[in-house]
Image (cartoon, rainbow, N blue to C red):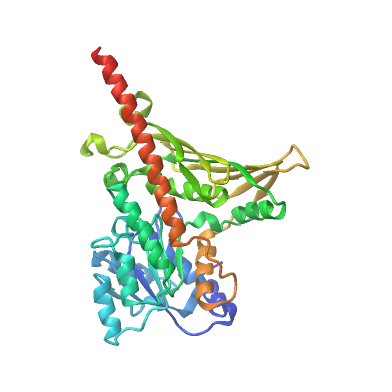
Amino acid sequence: MTQTTDQSSAHTANGQTGEFHVLLVGAGFAMFGTTEGPWNIAKRLEGRLGSRLVVDAIIEVDPSKAEAALAKKRDTPAHASYKSTKVFPDVDAYASAVSGGSLPIPKAICVATPPAVRGGMSEPRDLELKIIKHFPEANIFLEKPVATGAPWEKSVGEAKEVGRILREHKGIISVGYVLRYLRAVQTMKKIIEDNNLHVMATFARWIMAYPPGIKLDWWNKAILQGPVIEQGTHVCDLSRYFGGDINVETLSASAVEWYEKPGNLSQIQIDESKIPEDSRIPRFTSASWKYKSGAVGSMMHGVALQGTNDSIELQVFADGYQMILSDPYGSPELRIRSPDSDESQIISTAGDDPYQTEMNHFIDAIEGGGDPSILSSYEDAAQTYEFTWAIRLASEANSDKQKALYNEKGSA
């Protein structure tokens, strides 16, 4: 389907007409697309709103990045949506323009800044609070994770407090844990509901193809807090979506660290010597826990594959049922073994675009019509953030213990 067709069909969706004014916060890959994955908020706004979309402004600390993104957009079929877009350095400057009457109040605000500048209660991490101070009825879509900060007690505590504040906010709040919106995931949920099943166990796996990882910050857990918090958060959240709340006290985890023999990577594309040794990421992390429901769960994240495609899978078990979701970001496939047969039914959902579904739900929640359900609230997302920190802390504690034992034996 071409962009022109998308815009035409979206124009009359749910019978809505008239301009839909949007503020974009951040002009990076998640907002305007990346070769590393399907993230592209602007594309999904265009797909849902078509010619109704008016991007009034972009907030970006690096104006040249925003101007470069706008230059590309103005050379596409969606150019009309960006013809008058202005660039501002921060929320305060943009809010001044709105209060001065030169720009309308936005109908939606989409946030895709680095999580290190979000999820906090004070400068420079209080982006959400600034937005709702200026726009007390704002409808906000935020990328995940909700934060990546340290020390962990302060960062997690503040993210949960922001969640409590946003619970009382008058506008729609949606956090982009996109895998919840997969057709295959909703099929799994329906099977559980229709058969009155109780989830017994979940197993999640994300193994990264690491050569494309050329951002030095990603390999530095002092900056992005490590691969489980920054990337594994997707499958950790999906585990919670099926298993429910977690008894954090039951969680245990181990890691293959960079300095151990199995942690030696032959095709790493960054100069890891530029990263302090204590800040280098683990290569594998394996965790297990018990849900408050009584079910058990486990997760494995690895930085191990070569090539370009990650290997991702989620398994959910219930009495008589095994459901396996694979390749959720590529060509999602669901395998279902039921009490009726030892053979698995294979359901392919190739072409499913959960990013578009997610955006459609957000717009529907604002305007009505369609399916207005928001599948990830801020408070829920803050619990996933806390969960990923718990995994990192448990694995590091275990690694420290193993290192101490090794050093003790070496000096004996």
| Mark count | 0
Does the image show residue 273? yes
What percent of the width, then of the height, locates residue 76? 42, 71
Nearer to the camera, 112 or 289: 289
Task: Specify the quadrant of the image occupied by residue 272.
Answer: top left
What percent of the width, then of the height, locates residue 302? 43, 37
| Residue situated furthest right in the rendering | 340
In the picture, the quarter occupied by the C terminus is top left
What percent of the width, then of the height, locates residue 345? 71, 45
Nearer to the camera, 375 or 76: 375
Q: Residue at x 73, y 43 (%)?
A: 338
Residue 71 drawn above or below residue 266 = below
Residue 152 drawn above or below residue 174 = above
Nearer to the camera, 350 or 218: 218
Along the horizontal axis of the image, is 279 left or right of 52?
A: left
Q: Residue at x 40, y 53 (%)?
A: 35
Q: Residue at x 28, y 78 (%)?
A: 95
In the picture, the quarter occupied by the N terminus is bottom right
What percent of the width, then of the height, locates residue 101? 30, 87
| Residue situated furthest top in the rendering | 412
Residue 281 drawn above or below residue 354 = above
Does the image show residue 266? no
Nearer to the camera, 101 or 198: 198
| Residue situated furthest bottom in the rendering | 101
